[in-house]
Amino acid sequence: MKIGILCYPTYGGSGIVATELGMSLAKKGYEVHFISSELPARLDMTDPNIFFHKVNVQTYPLFKHQPFDIALSSTIYQVVKLYKLDILHAHYAIPYAYAAFFAKQMLKEENADIPLVTTLHGTDITLVGQHPSYKHAVEFSINQSDKITTVSESLKSDTLKFFKITKEIEVITNFIDNTEFEDLKTCQRNHFANEDEKILIHVSNLRPVKRIKDVLDIFNKVEKSVKSKLLILGDGPDVEVINEFINENPHLINKIKLLGKVDNLYQILKFADVFLLPSEQESFGLAALEAMAAETPVISSNAGGIPEVNIQGETGFLAEVGNVEAMASYAIKLLSDDKLLAEIKTKAKARALEFDLVNILPIYEKMYEETLAEFH
Ligand code: GMT
């Protein structure tokens, strides 16, 4: 089967899921064609079954805004025809499902139409997709897809709540390749904290939806009871919030470290003691699953699909969005009790194994087969 994957190339969760899925399919012998504005961050181009097609946006003095969606649909159309793709898989409704619809219309003219699967990832439904500038186009493109999937039950119900959806939605959760956490080079924990200090960690694209201020407030409370350090990984607009917080709390300057977008995320997750995810919205929480695969318990909000991943008292702890007090108390409880911490670490890993790639990949393969069969 020849599969076309349309995704964001950046470090966002949808791009990571699309890339990891495509690479795993390629390893199984599928021919996988990525169509994106840049080479996706984690894509291994040494695999002979992987192809990359860059969307080339032409500038022209008349354009105030370059028409990316037109260039995208033209690229999809060309790649489908040239490489004789069997199926398209759009990750994130806008602009991918939207542009794929127009590519399909062009292909239809030549009796060369192929099925389109759209996977909704979260903010395309709960945040940006709600905006009046996009809402109707999002609803239209979802309904025009031949198959719709969401990454959690929660996102499925949000999709049905916010949009008039005329088709069945299948839930196929995010996944993790647990083998990537084996044989990781020994971590340099002592580069970040002394032996008597615990490490709290947060990883995100530092957008308002991640509630970075809550991460900092939780740490501020924890640090008063438990000797600890806070590591923040990732980059985004709310990096300013961190700088402002440190400015107002100068005594924490040597306790909070920003690492930016690192390449060895899994190694660093392995020596963290607690992962903080107090998000306002989170359709699934891939970052939490990555932490759990590294045996790091998660203290999170109970937003969206997080409770489908992080189990209260088992793999970590959850509280209402914004309840910094409760999240800090849970962290103090966990970090002050080595026996409890060890137990929760083990259970977090066991939970991550339930979402292993070997369990989820066959669900995607079956979905492709069924979609193709229904289409033809
Ligand atoms: O929230 C992000 O950091 C990025 C965003 C994306 O679409 O790239 O992530 C969403 O998709 C991930 C993969 O399916 C989910 O695990 C995240 O929970 C989801 N983020 C939100 O819903 C806020």
Image (cartoon, rainbow, N blue to C red):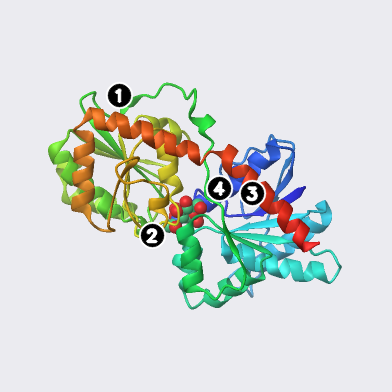
Mark 1 lies on a secondary structure that is helix
Q: On residue 190, which mark appears?
A: 1
Q: How far apart are marks 1 and 2 (CA)?
A: 34 Å
Amino acid type at circle 2 is Gln
SS under mark 2: loop
The answer to whether marks 1 and 3 mark residues whose Cβ atoms lie closer than 8 Å is no
Q: Name the residue under label 3.
A: 364
**Is residue 315 among what the camera can see?**
yes
Mark nearest the camera among 4 and 1 is 4
Nearest-to-viewer mark from 1 and 2: 2
Dot 4 and dot 3 residues touching (CB under 8 Å): no
Residue type at numbered disc 1:
Asn
Residue 215 is situated, as x and y percent measured from the top left of the image, at: 27, 49
Q: Distance between the residues labelled 4 and 2?
A: 18 Å
Image quarter (top left, top right, bottom left or bottom right) of the C terminus: bottom right
Marks 1 and 2, the one that precedes in the sequence: 1
Q: Which of marks 1 and 3 is nearer the N terminus?
A: 1
- Closer to the eye: label 4 or 3: 3
- At x 45% / y 34%, what residue is drawn? 266
The structure residue drawn at horizontal position 48% and vertical position 78%, both measured from the top left corner, is 132
Question: In which quadrant of the rendered view does residue 109 lie?
Answer: bottom right
**Residue identified by numbered label 4:** 17
**Label located before the other in sequence (4 or 2):** 4
